[in-house]
Image (spheres, coloured by chain):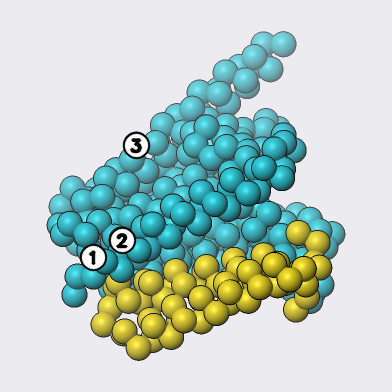
Amino acid sequence: MPELRGKGWRVLGYFVWMLGAGVVLDSDGLATGRLLLLAGVALFALGVWQSASGTSGAPQ
Amino acid sequence: MSRPAFAFLNLALIFGAAFVGMSLYWRRHPDASGVKGSRLISSRVRAWYFSNLAPFETLLVRTGVQPIALTYTQVVASVASAFAYAGGLVFTAGFLVLFTGTLDILDGKVARRSNGVSPRGAFLDSVMDRYAEFVGYVGLMVFFGTGWRVWMVLLAILGGTMVSYARARAEGLGLRCEIGWLQRPERFVLLGFGSIFSSIWVHLVGGDHGLLAATVTLLAVLSNATAAQRIAYASRSLARSSDA
């Protein structure tokens, strides 16, 4: 999915984080929530790394 | 269970991400005159949000996803938000409301970019939008249960329906009527962030979602005021055109 390089992964990471935050704040599903939070951070970090290393080539 | 530290972290994250993202975007793209804005959501804020969605728009167009599929997904997300409200999952429900709004933006953009704009698509989009909005409010009614808050939800439903009906009826008579304070994107933003901040507030301070009740009250007042604005505008314009 070259279209998502850089900004796309950052935005997706933010959305996944917010979903995980909802699980943590609204329920006792801590394990699921933490998994989503970690996935969100990982996707965001991937986007930041792609932007920083100049590998984000999709038109944005 | 109350989690004030994590709630505060998310509050900082929401404002921090918005501040940094908008600042960086506006520095590179100071002119947003090509994007239509409103009193509550300026054209610059809209341009920034659209730029965040651009990678997904490109991906959806390349993979051949039909705009109507996004419209139906929007209804599913709205049903999920209704269940979340009904189950007391207010933060999640608010997030799903914002996600529903995002899908509403994406279906139109994908339709335009893939030359998929059609009268059938426009009709189904409008009708599904009404279902999606109504379903979310039903979840809120279940959440509030009884009392004046339920009446505010009912007034918000009435206002949202009349805003759309006034526009549709005016357009049926050949008059464009896209005016008013609280159009659909503004309603998404108000209800979505109202729910998220209400949940954070409850974790930080306690209480019983008074902020969400205040948000729904504001929605009820402003959406009915918007309907009144449209009715007055259409009435004046139609009177003028019949005099001429």
Q: Residue B65: x and y, percent?
A: 74, 73
- Helix, strand or loop at mark 1: helix
Q: Are marks 3 and 2 in contact (CB under 8 Å)?
A: no
List the residue tagged with mark 3.
B221
List the residue tagged with mark 2.
B8
Q: Residue B188: x and y, percent?
A: 47, 52
Q: Which mark is residue B4?
A: 1
- Helix, strand or loop at mark 2: helix
Q: Colour of chain A?
A: yellow
Q: Quadrant of the N terminus of chain B?
A: bottom left
Q: Is residue B101 visible?
A: yes
Task: Indicate left or right for B239 with B219 as reference.
Answer: right
Residue A24, located in which quarter of the rendered image? bottom left
- Mark 3–mark 2 Cα distance, whole angstroms, equals 30 Å
Looking at the image, which is closer to me, B20 or B14? B20
Q: Which tag is nearer the camera, tag 3 or tag 2?
A: 2
- The residue depicted at 81 percent of the width and 61 percent of the height is A59
Looking at the image, which is closer to me, B11 or B119? B11
- Mark 1–mark 2 Cα distance, whole angstroms, equals 6 Å
